[in-house]
């Protein structure tokens, strides 16, 4: 009889506030469960051994502040299974991704796409931010979820209670990491880079638009090379606008595909520009019919717009049918532009761009050699004339080099260099400078385009006489054998 009384007393009496074997932040509310004869606490089929549960009359906010609440029982769920922390479930204005979904997609430690279902009880689910100051692990930063629930990224290693997941409406996990003192410099670096890139693009886009309208409104500049340059500038406006948007928003699949297409659109039109300059440098034709120029421009359009479309379609088909290992699938829009895996970015972005850029450099070198040879063959021996020739020679080569995208070549070198987290301070500074120069490419192109005396005269003429027109049916290109001054026409 005494044994029955003691047993019932244990069931109905409040739990003794013994020490618990985990931090408060690693506990979940298990009120509503019951104790068995072995002093284990049972809640939703989970067994919490003695010492892993306790009654609390408070909750802790961000590890520090205690807030009084009604007494409730909490258990150390992370003592016997890996835990995943959700930043929130429902509506939290401080976290942009706050879905009520119980399923979401992550990359596991083998770089494979994995769907986690929180209802299958494989993970302990903790809800609420684990610290007050958190920053979003950027889309461009590769990260993987380890088997023990921790997060590995190029920003560092985060224990399960040092980060949390926001879940987008598309059921994609967006990690937020705690802002620790040791991470201050890394976080400030990311913030500084974001500001620099944003400012650079905001400077670049208006100058690109101005340059486009200069060529659109001045008929004398709308020769074959001028129209090709206009297409290149349009591609730059598109890609810079999308990149600026992606810097501050999580892009979805359609937006990622448009961005992917626009990136290649830029490089293929850059290739068209370089080929056109190279073609003119090899030609001795001083004039061409308008119809012939239109046919050539049509071919340029088929190449400049068609090749990026073909590459995008192939990538979309691979992404849809997934014929290879997951490391080789783009996964557009699920983790920013595409899969964080370095192999994937190399295959689908960096290697094709590097090939195009190297082709452009070869064309540039050969064009420069031909320009140099043409100038030498017709040079006057007078000192002043020689100085003027060298000035033009340098000016033309510089313009070609900028237009052909040496900046983008540096981007490829940046990608294939040491991992971001392993870079020295010098490398960080160097690539930050090249990144900023890349961002203000629109300003540089504007300066290149108006630095030519002939172009400035045409702008002035257009402003004074808005109805100026071109010669009927004839456009002029460089004649390297006969006229030194026509070299400037080649660039534009």
Image (cartoon, rainbow, N blue to C red):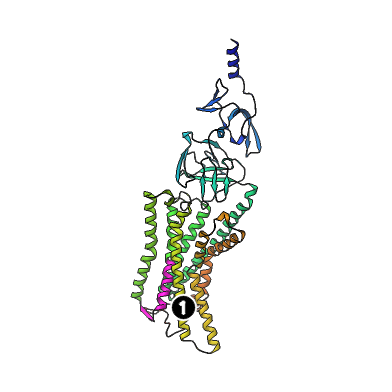
Q: Secondary structure at mark 1?
A: helix
- Closest to the observer: 283 or 160? 160
Q: Is residue 276 visible?
A: yes
- Closest to the observer: 286 or 358? 358
- Closest to the observer: 155 or 300? 155
The answer to whether residue 287 is left or right of residue 402 is left
Please provide the residue range marked out in magenta. Answer: 269-289
* Residue 353 included in the magenta stretch of the image: no
The answer to whether residue 275 is left or right of residue 240 is left
Residue 188 position in % (x across, y down): 62, 53
Which residue does the numbered mark 1 point to in the structure image?
369
Residue 439 position in % (x across, y down): 53, 62
Kindly report the secondary structure that dominates the magenta region of the rendered protein.
helix
Figure check: 52 above or below 1:
below
In which quarter of the view is residue 299 placed? bottom left
* Residue 287 included in the magenta stretch of the image: yes
Q: Residue at x 57, y 50 (%)?
A: 155
Residue 265 position in % (x across, y down): 42, 62
Could you tell me which quadrant the C terminus lies in? Answer: bottom left
The answer to whether residue 15 is left or right of residue 331 is right
Q: Is residue 485 visible?
A: no
């Amino acid at each position: 009889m005494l044994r029955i009384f003691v047993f019932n007393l244990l069931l109905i009496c409040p739990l003794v506030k013994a020490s618990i074997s985990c931090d408060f932040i690693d506990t979940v509310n298990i009120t509503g469960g019951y104790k068995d004869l072995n002093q284990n606490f049972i809640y939703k089929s989970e067994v919490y051994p003695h010492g892993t549960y306790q009654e609390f009359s408070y909750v802790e906010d961000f590890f520090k502040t205690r807030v009084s609440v009604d007494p409730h029982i909490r258990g150390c769920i992370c003592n016997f299974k890996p835990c995943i922390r959700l930043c929130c479930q429902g509506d939290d204005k401080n976290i942009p991704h706050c879905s009520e979904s119980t399923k979401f997609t992550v990359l596991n430690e083998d770089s494979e796409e994995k769907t986690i279902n929180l209802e299958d009880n494989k993970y302990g689910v903790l809800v609420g931010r684990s610290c007050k100051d958190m920053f979003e692990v950027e889309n461009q930063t590769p990260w993987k979820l380890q088997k023990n629930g921790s997060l590995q990224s190029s920003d560092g290693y985060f224990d399960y209670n040092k980060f949390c997941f926001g879940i987008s409406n598309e059921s994609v996990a967006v990690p937020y990491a705690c802002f620790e003192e040791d991470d201050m410099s890394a976080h400030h670096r990311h913030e500084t880079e974001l500001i620099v890139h944003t400012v650079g693009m905001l400077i670049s886009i208006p100058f690109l638009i101005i340059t486009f309208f200069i060529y659109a409104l001045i008929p004398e500049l709308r020769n074959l090379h001028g129209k090709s340059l206009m297409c290149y500038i349009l591609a730059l406006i598109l890609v810079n606008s999308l990149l600026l948007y992606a810097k501050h928003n999580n892009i979805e699949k359609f937006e990622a595909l448009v961005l992917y297409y626009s990136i290649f659109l830029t490089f293929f039109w850059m290739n068209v520009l370089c080929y056109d300059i190279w073609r003119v440098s090899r030609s001795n034709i001083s004039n061409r019919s308008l119809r012939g120029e239109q046919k050539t421009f049509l071919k340029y359009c088929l190449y400049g717009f068609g090749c990026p479309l073909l590459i995008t379609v192939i990538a979309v088909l691979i992404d849809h049918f997934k014929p290879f290992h997951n490391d080789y699938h783009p996964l557009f829009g699920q983790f920013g532009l595409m899969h964080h895996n370095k192999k994937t970015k190399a295959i689908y972005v960096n290697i094709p761009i590097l090939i195009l850029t190297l082709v452009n450099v070869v064309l540039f070198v050969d064009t420069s050699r031909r320009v140099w040879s043409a100038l030498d063959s017709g040079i006057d021996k007078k000192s002043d004339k020689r100085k003027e020739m060298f000035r033009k020679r340098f000016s033309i080569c510089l313009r070609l080099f900028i237009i052909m995208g040496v900046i983008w070549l540096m981007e490829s070198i940046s990608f294939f260099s040491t991992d971001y987290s392993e870079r020295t301070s010098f490398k960080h500074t160097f690539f930050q400078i090249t990144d900023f120069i890349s961002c203000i490419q629109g300003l540089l192109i504007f300066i290149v385009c108006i630095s030519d005396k002939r172009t400035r005269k045409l702008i002035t003429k257009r402003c004074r006489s808005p109805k100026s027109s071109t010669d009927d049916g004839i456009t002029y290109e460089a004649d390297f054998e006969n006229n030194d001054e026509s070299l400037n026409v080649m660039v534009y």
